[in-house]
Amino acid sequence: MRSRGCRVGSVVLRGGTVIAADGRLRADVRIEDEQIAELAPDLGGSNADEIDARGLFIFPGGIDVHLHFNEPGRTGWEGGATGSRALAAGGGTMFFDMPLNSTPCTVNAGEVDRKRAALEESSIADFALWGGLVPGSIGDMAGMAERGVVGFKAFMCDSGLPEFPRADDATLRDGMTEAARLGLPIAVHAESEEMIRRLSETYTGTSVSDFLASRPVMAEVEAIGRAVQLAEETGAKLHIVHVSSGSGVLKAHEGRLRGVDVSIETCPHYLFFTEDDLHRLDVVGKCAPPLRDAEEHGKLWQQLLNGGIDIVASDHSPCDPSLKKSRDFKGSWGGIAGVQSTLAVLLERGHDGRRLRFERIATLLAGTPAQRFGIPKKGSVAVGNDADLVLVDPSADYTLEAEHLHQRHKISPYLRAMFGGVVRRTIRRGEAIFVDGKITAVTKGRYVRPSY
Ligand SMILES: [Zn+2]
């Protein structure tokens, strides 16, 4: 129960520019009882608290549909407390936690309950949960759906964790059939296990180049094609996580043209870096699928600018620093910890670099995530929605330093990078949870179930 001191009264954001899906509008925003109560130019005076939003753009709070806070069980790697603070500092107000790398993994109803309880204690952001699809977990999917998961995540290749084995094609097909029955999407990590395993036997070195050669674009494209085909056959909704290449996006589009219900996610690191950067970043930039060459990177951007990509999510995947730093490239943990920088990357490289419109950024980070996964009352700045808002100052810039990061371990590939646009304030259900560089949250985040 919340104490009376935490109750959110009436607040007016005065003089900002609201980013709505269909355009921008100079308007004041009145927040009452956690929701957006009024949205209009020059709202009349009242006894509400006022926040000066002149010169600021008001975005909907970001909904990060793909990250790993590793709670419960691996909070030494991150945890909901630090992870959600980093999310808030980057302009996020809600996240979907993946079924790994918490331990045990979230593959049955009991583990959904445990993770929910843990995050209700620790997170300052609202959250939803992904269930896991692994061999043997199909009988548990209905129970997880009852508990309100947004869908089920499967790996088509080795996940890196023995306790979360990959879904072979038969498991994937049966899992999709069950997911279609339950009306929930399947999310896949699409890389071909067979191709990666064979190529790893050829490229046995420990270098960056060997790693890249063992996980080519073709391994991603082939697996996306297979997943799309299985979704077509079973009628399942399919979400392809972290597509790293323009060719991968085009492969998914082939299915979409045939009427398959497929959504495409990419991550900020694929938009910010290429494989040339990986030689410099070394283990800090290791992820799977890997960073791509300039040509695929360019094609990925082209798809993003043309509307061919639906969602951008962080895939924040931290680990204990010892799993990165004291190991050679091959033996190090694959995962980039960039939850705080998703909006920053789209503002810097998208808006400033490529004229990506603010409206489109809001759709990629909030509008489509809410719509695709049935998240009620979130995703856009509209009367009646939760007051999940981010106030951005587009005229300020900064260089990211380790002390800016709120995540548990200050390891990020974006350190020392320059970003145009500063998050001044993040508001979750009417409460300012991040203001001018500081976490100000008093209440905790809330578990959210999809409603279609
Ligand atoms: Zn992931």
Image (cartoon, rainbow, N blue to C red):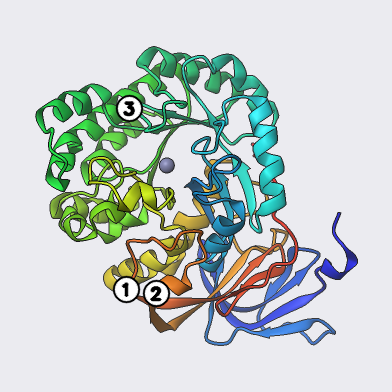
The tag on residue 157 is: 3
Secondary structure of the residue carrying tag 1 is loop
Q: Is mark 2 within 8 Å of ligand 1?
A: no
Pointer 3 or 2: first along the chain? 3
Pointer 2 or 1: first along the chain? 2
The tag on residue 401 is: 2
At 16% from the left edge and 47% from the top edge, which residue is drawn? 208
Q: Residues within 10 Å of mark 2 (few under 14, many from 20)?
A: some
Pointer 3 or 1: first along the chain? 3
**Three-letter code for the amino acid on which mark 1 is drawn:** Arg
Q: Are marks 2 and 1 in contact (CB under 8 Å)?
A: yes
At 54% from the left edge and 68% from the top edge, which residue is drawn? 89
At 30% from the left edge and 31% from the top edge, which residue is drawn? 224
Secondary structure of the residue carrying tag 3 is loop
At 36% from the left edge and 16% from the top edge, which residue is drawn? 169
Q: Residues within 10 Å of mark 3 (few under 14, many from 20)?
A: many
**Three-letter code for the amino acid on which mark 3 is drawn:** Cys
x then y, percent, for residue 448? 68, 45
x then y, percent, for residue 305? 30, 58
Query: Residue reaching furthest right?
Result: 4
Q: Is mark 3 within 8 Å of ligand 1?
A: no
Q: Are marks 3 and 2 in contact (CB under 8 Å)?
A: no
Q: Quadrant of residue 130?
A: top right
The tag on residue 186 is: none
Which residue in the protein does label 1 denote? 416
| Distance between mark 3 and mark 1 Cα atoms | 33 Å
